[in-house]
Image (cartoon, rainbow, N blue to C red):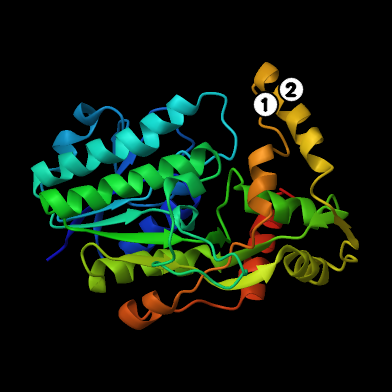
């Protein structure tokens, strides 16, 4: 019997990868989309589109009826916002309202897309896991704060209202259909174009977006209600990521490692200008603060309990470059 699955975020980078996988698995997908959203990623997909907004439950309430599963992938993902309250309304309030509506509609299984941004980091730079201690005070910037609060809302609903949800925490997806692009996608585009002659000493966990989508499916099929699973890939210094990109495109890698302290006054100036113009700054104080830490994570729990796997980082980076080039981003 064909299952009907409700999906948010289908127009986005990760959401469209989840949508494509669900269709391949034979699901009927009802996708919540904003009326003014860019739907390029949905071209050719056999989806039932539901126009609405996370912060307006009346716009999607009836569409949840009859859905067996739900994937909540949508989020306002920006590293700088002029209006922090707007991001809170989507990421925190929107998540809470959607989960309550799903409970009322009798949805049987939910996968909530959180982020490694909500997790603790080890001071010695070793990979963190789902149990690494963390608190709200560790959250740097509005995005991390709102995702942390949203995850806490989901956990509260699981504990007190028997919400049938599994939480997944993707790291840094890269790959095809990154139409915005994401902050990491922009790093790749700039590096391919030779616009990153220098770097800061930080580290990321990079993973192919299609592997993260498969992790969502495995969480639906095998995940424990109330559990959190890191869906990541390879832990790499930014210098190594840029070197891989340079090798793939035949450019010399950047040689200059920038000290972070002198960059803070520049970031403050960029933020001040951004508040005047509304244009997102290239660098912010929060991104510099985050870059001080190596954001390395372990996927051992997802591997053990879900059977999760991921492809080599070079393959993920190469796929991202190929798509950006094909779409004339670089």
> Camera-side residue: 251 or 100?
100
Identify the residue shown where x is 49% and y is 53%: 117
Give the structural element (helix, strand or loop) at label 2: helix
Location of residue 301 by image quarter: bottom left
Number of residues whose C-alpha sits closer than 10 Å to that of mark 1, classed few (under 14), some (14–19) or many (20 or more): some
Identify the residue shown where x is 41% and y is 32%: 88
> Camera-side residue: 165 or 194?
165
How far is the residue under mark 2 from the one under mark 1? 8 Å
On the picture, is 292 further left or further right than 253? left
Q: Which residue is mark 2?
A: 273
Image x and y of residue 329, in percent: 71, 48
Location of residue 149 by image quarter: top left
Residue 279: image tag? 1
> Camera-side residue: 207 or 286?
286
Q: Say if mark 2 contacts mark 1, CB within 8 Å.
A: yes
Image x and y of residue 266, in percent: 81, 34
Question: Reading the chain from its start, which is encountered first: label 2 or label 1?
Answer: 2
Give the structural element (helix, strand or loop) at label 1: loop
């Amino acid at each position: 019997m064909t299952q009907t699955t409700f999906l948010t975020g289908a127009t986005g980078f990760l959401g469209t990868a989840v949508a494509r996988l669900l269709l391949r698995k034979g699901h009927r997908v009802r996708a919540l989309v904003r009326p003014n959203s860019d739907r390029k990623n949905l071209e050719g997909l056999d989806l039932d589109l539901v126009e609405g907004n996370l912060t307006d439950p009346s716009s999607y309430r009836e569409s949840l009826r009859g859905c067996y599963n739900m994937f909540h992938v949508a989020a306002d993902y920006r590293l700088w916002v002029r209006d922090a309250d707007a991001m809170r309304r989507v990421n925190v309030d929107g998540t809470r309202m959607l989960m309550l509506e799903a409970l009322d509609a009798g949805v049987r299984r939910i996968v909530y897309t959180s982020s490694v941004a909500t997790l603790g980091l080890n001071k010695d730079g070793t990979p963190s896991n789902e149990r690494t201690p963390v608190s709200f005070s560790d959250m740097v910037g509005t995005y991390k704060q709102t995702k942390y609060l949203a995850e806490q809302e989901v956990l509260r609903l699981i504990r007190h209202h028997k919400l049938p949800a599994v939480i997944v925490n993707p790291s840094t997806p890269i790959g095809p259909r990154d139409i915005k692009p994401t902050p990491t996608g922009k790093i790749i585009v700039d590096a391919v174009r030779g616009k990153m002659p220098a770097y800061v000493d930080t580290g990321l966990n990079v993973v192919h977006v299609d592997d993260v989508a498969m992790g969502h499916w495995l969480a639906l099929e095998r995940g424990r209600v109330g559990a959190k699973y890191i869906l990541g890939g390879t832990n790499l210094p930014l210098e190594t990521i840029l070197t891989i990109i340079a090798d793939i495109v035949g450019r010399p890698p950047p040689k200059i490692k920038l000290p972070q302290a002198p960059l803070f006054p520049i970031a403050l100036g960029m933020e001040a200008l951004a508040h005047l113009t509304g244009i997102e700054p290239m660098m912010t104080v929060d991104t510099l603060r985050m870059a001080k830490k190596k954001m390395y994570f372990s996927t051992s729990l997802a591997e053990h309990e879900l059977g999760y796997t991921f492809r080599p980082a070079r393959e993920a980076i190469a796929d991202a470059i190929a798509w950006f080039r094909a779409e004339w981003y670089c």
